[in-house]
Image: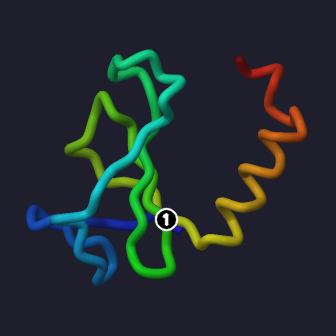
Amino acid sequence: MGGESDQLGVLRGIRLSGVTWEKSPFSGGNDNCVEFAVIGELIAMRDSKRPEQTPLVYTRSEIAALLAGAKAGAFDHLA
């Protein structure tokens, strides 16, 4: 989905302030990971090293497809 945001953290009418960002416990406690946040029926994703940048926003079905692919090993060659 993606999109433009303003200084107040609004992405296509979605308010990003106050959301809880989560990252994998496998990140080793550093900032070298991707964070996710639930925003209603959508999931936002951002780079933990650059939290000020506009996050990408996906539907739950898009995230489900990503996770299914990852669990099946579709992206193992990227690690």
Residue drawn at the location 39% of the way across and 46% of the way down: 22
* Vertical order, 71 against 58 (above or below): above
Nearer the observer, 48 or 71 = 71
Residue wearing tag 1:
43
Residue drawn at the location 89% of the way across and 40% of the way down: 72
Residue 19 location, quadrant: bottom left
Nearer the observer, 7 or 17 = 17
Q: Amino acid at mark 1?
A: Ile
Quarter of the C terminus within the rendering: top right
Number of numbered callouts drawn: 1
Residue drawn at the location 49% of the way across and 73% of the way down: 42
Instruction: Give left or right: position of 11 versus 32.
Output: left
Q: x, y (%) of residue 8? A: 10, 67
Nearer the observer, 46 or 36 = 36
Instruction: Give left or right: position of 37 versus 72.
Output: left
Residue 7 location, quadrant: bottom left
Q: x, y (%) of residue 77? A: 82, 20
